[in-house]
């Protein structure tokens, strides 16, 4: 039933991170324990039992450090303190202890490319003279003369542009009021770039690593891991880099092969169209959509290069790897298989693999897979390229579909072109087909969780949450929205606070404050909305939630067969019981991405995803263990219509992922089953399934 084995990297690595499922927590939007409308660390602690029951192995927390919050905490003012918005350092310690007691590892965010402009170092730099030791910690430079030979310095040191829009340089003012030097900020003006050629900067970040390692954290997600080091001389560069960027092919964008230029609208997707057309049902050859292959020379050969060509002078510089070799040595001094995972928007996959060589980082996010969209050929290419690149350095791969910087895949997959990658969605933009997007998202989840390696889950995707696509402009807070004058809609739509209980204010976002949490991190009844103890009513969540969240709240899905929450619990349970994270990979005979069928074998599980337009027969000798198809349930139409055609097996008790039992009945023909089997004959379009022989 299998063919053409593909290298399976890291399957013999015993460290926990090699096969872990990691749940990303965006703290300000996860759970509110003090009723101020903002999530916090005590809220995280209160919901940890929910995550244990979900079946994940680890959590990753986005920044909770002291910060003026110009970029939602990615502008750090003090790397060793918790921002009062999220609590105290003691709250973090308590959360860490609770997580470890539940068997959950804890990864924290590290932001080494830049600090906040309110960091004590940058304030000292502003007060110091040009050329001082204080200024050498950052990227201060004199300006170029607008009038040649005048010394006016009125022009920025080079033409670099900020990732968030606008120029990447801001001029300072001297104590006497005269114009001063310029400082570099590849992101917001309040996020000055550190100078990683400075020995003091390197030692300070080693110290920060040790501070959190000493407290017991299990790893770090490294923000902008491909940044930090800049090309000597800071040369001009006419490209415009982006953190969330699709791959491009030679000749598909103007001016330079693969360069993202001003001629491309910044809020649209930059994943290149197929060479042979723009249909996305899977009728083009996978070899035609490989990313990063730019053909050079007369011998018909090709050389993989970055889609940013000529290469960016501030991203993916070779010098960054010495930093990670240094950090690897720091982590090696601690027990417990501590780890680093890179957020590095680097292509092609072979170049990304350099970040996870044995003496550098342990993991890197697989953005090729995230950017593939709902397309069998693109996804097949991303899987194969990723596994082969990781195998070349004997490291495991990772799989991710959404995060705090991207439009949620539930909504992306519901667009007319489900491979596009918009920079946010507003009410005046195309609105996704919610039902179709959810069907496809559920199917893609089964693919992701069945692949060998480590998988990352963004908070709320286990509930099938969509992007908030009608968020009013006055509610938006992302600096990208303001720095691009709204051309880029920004990332607020994927950062909306989670819905825990449908009938409560803020859909239960503040249940940890009002006292409505049950002992397992779920919700309980019988307490008034003010907590029943004289508490003031909780403030409204910091971002407004869409009405669709009422149907998708955790309490509406908990224990409901066919719900997205139960699908995730079942998939994670099967992933563990079959050892898929540390398993093998081989394309199956029925794998046919040109027809929209993605099929592979991992250990004893055959995974089939139908991304085409016609039903796919279940192969003889196999039975369906788990299907992404959603059936009728208490939450109503939000979970979609039946998509698997077949006949239910005889009723039998089957074990749910949380250890409870459920009776399989007529609803099973379109529902989700784990621990038993579903006698289906075909797998419908926009559906995926796990099958075993027998």
Image (spheres, grey):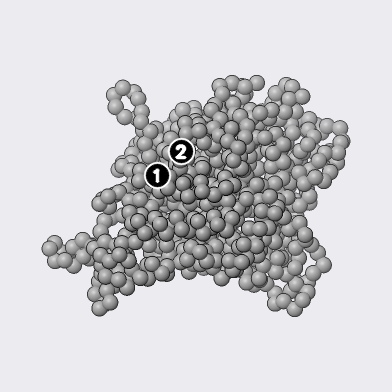
Question: Is residue 321 something that shows in the picture?
Answer: yes
Tell which of 682 and 151 is nearer to you: 151
- Identify residue for label 2: 357
Point out the residue furthest to the left here: 149
Q: In this view, does 590 lie to the left or right of 662?
A: left
Percent across and percent down for residue 530 are 74, 74
| Secondary structure category for the residue under label 1 | helix
Seen at 49% across and 27% down, the residue is: 285
The residue lying at 48 percent from left, 58 percent from top is 208
Write down the residue under mark 1.
321
Q: Report the number of numbered marks.
A: 2
Q: In this view, does 253 lie above or below 140?
A: above
Residue sitting at x 28%, y 55%: 159
**Which part of the image, by quadrant, shows the C terminus?**
top right
Which numbered marker is on residue 171? none
The location of residue 463, given as percent across then percent down, is 67, 51
Residue 683 versus residue 239: which sits nearer the camera? 239
Left-right relation of 692 to 591: right
Which of 472/141 is in front? 141
* SS at mark 2 in the image: loop
Q: Which residue is rendered at x = 68% and y = 30% of the image?
A: 605
Contact, mark 2 vs mark 1 (Cβ under 8 Å): yes
Q: Nearer the viewer, residue 564 or 603?
A: 603
Bin the neighbour count of mark 2 within 10 Å (Cα to Cα): few under 14, some 14-19, many 20 and up.
Answer: some
Crowd tier of the residue under label 1, counting other residues whose Cα lies within 10 Å: few below 14, some 14–19, many 20 or above: many
Give the alpha-carbon distance from disc 2 to disc 1, as whole Å: 10 Å
| Image quarter of residue 44 | bottom right
Image quarter (top left, top right, bottom left or bottom right) of the N terminus: top right
Give the mark nearer the N terminus: 2 vs 1: 1
Task: Give the vertical position of 91 relative to 685 (above or below).
Answer: below
Q: Give residue 124's position: percent from left, percent from top.
A: 35, 70
């Amino acid at each position: 039933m299998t063919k053409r084995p593909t290298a399976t990297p890291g399957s013999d690595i015993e460290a926990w991170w090699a096969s872990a499922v990691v749940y990303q927590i965006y703290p300000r939007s996860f759970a509110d324990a003090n009723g101020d409308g903002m999530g916090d660390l005590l809220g995280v602690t209160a919901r940890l039992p929910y995550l244990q029951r979900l079946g994940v192995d680890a959590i990753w927390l986005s920044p909770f450090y002291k910060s003026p919050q110009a970029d939602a905490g990615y502008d750090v003012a003090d790397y060793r303190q918790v921002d009062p918005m999220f609590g105290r350092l003691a709250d973090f310690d308590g959360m860490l202890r609770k997580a470890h007691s539940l068997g959950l590892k804890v990864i924290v965010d590290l932001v080494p490319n830049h600090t906040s402009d309110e960091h004590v170092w940058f304030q000292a730099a502003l007060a110091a003279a040009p050329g001082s030791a204080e200024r050498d910690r950052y990227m201060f430079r004199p300006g170029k003369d607008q009038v040649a030979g005048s010394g006016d310095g009125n022009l920025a040191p080079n033409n670099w542009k900020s990732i968030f829009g606008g120029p990447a340089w801001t001029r300072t003012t001297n104590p006497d009021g005269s114009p001063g030097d310029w400082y570099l900020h590849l992101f917001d003006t309040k996020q000055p770039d550190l100078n990683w050629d400075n020995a003091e900067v390197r030692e300070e970040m080693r110290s920060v690593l040790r501070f959190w390692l000493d407290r017991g954290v299990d790893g770090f997600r490294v923000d902008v891991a491909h940044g930090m080091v800049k090309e000597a001389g800071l040369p001009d560069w006419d490209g415009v880099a982006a953190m969330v960027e699709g791959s491009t092919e030679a000749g598909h964008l103007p001016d330079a092969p693969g360069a993202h230029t001003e001629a491309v609208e910044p809020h649209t997707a930059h994943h290149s169209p197929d060479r042979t057309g723009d249909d996305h049902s899977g009728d083009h050859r996978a070899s035609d959509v490989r990313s990063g292959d730019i053909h050079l020379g007369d011998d018909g050969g090709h050389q993989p290069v970055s889609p940013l060509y000529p290469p960016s002078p501030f991203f993916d510089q070779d010098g960054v790897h010495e930093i990670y070799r240094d950090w690897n040595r720091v982590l090696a001094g601690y027990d417990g298989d501590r780890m680093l995972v890179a957020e590095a928007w680097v292509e092609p996959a072979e170049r990304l693999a350099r970040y996870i060589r044995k003496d550098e980082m342990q993991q890197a996010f697989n953005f090729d897979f995230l950017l593939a969209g709902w397309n069998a050929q693109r996804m097949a290419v991303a899987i194969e390229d990723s596994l082969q690149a990781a195998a070349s350095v004997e490291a495991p791969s990772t799989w991710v579909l959404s995060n705090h910087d991207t439009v949620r895949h539930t909504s992306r997959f519901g667009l007319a072109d489900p491979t596009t990658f918009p920079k946010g969605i507003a009410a005046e933009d195309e609105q996704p087909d919610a039902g179709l997007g959810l069907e496809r998202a559920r199917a893609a989840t089964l693919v992701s969780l069945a692949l060998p390696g480590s998988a990352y889950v963004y908070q709320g995707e286990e509930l099938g949450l969509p992007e908030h696509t009608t968020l009013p402009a006055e509610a938006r807070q992302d600096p990208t929205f303001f720095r691009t004058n709204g051309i880029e809609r920004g990332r607020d739509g994927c950062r909306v606070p989670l819905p825990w209980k449908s009938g409560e204010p803020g859909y239960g976002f503040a249940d940890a404050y009002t006292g409505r949490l049950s002992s397992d991190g779920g919700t309980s009844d019988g307490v008034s909305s003010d907590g029943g103890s004289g508490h003031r009513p909780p403030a409204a969540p910091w971002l407004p939630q869409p009405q669709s969240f009422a149907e998708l709240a955790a309490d509406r899905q908990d224990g409901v067969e066919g719900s997205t929450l139960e699908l995730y619990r079942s998939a994670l349970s099967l992933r563990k019981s079959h050892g898929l994270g540390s398993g093998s990979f081989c394309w199956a005979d029925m794998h046919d991405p040109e027809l929209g069928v993605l099929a592979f074998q991992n250990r004893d599980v055959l995974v089939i995803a139908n991304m085409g337009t016609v039903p796919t027969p279940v192969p003889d000798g196999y039975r369906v263990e788990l299907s992404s198809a959603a059936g009728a349930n208490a939450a109503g139409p939000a979970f979609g219509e039946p998509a698997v055609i077949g006949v239910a097996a005889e009723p039998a008790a089957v074990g749910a992922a949380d250890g409870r039992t459920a009776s399989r009945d007529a609803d099973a023909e379109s529902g989700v089953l784990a621990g038993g089997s579903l006698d289906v004959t075909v797998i419908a379009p926009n559906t995926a399934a796990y099958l075993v022989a027998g």
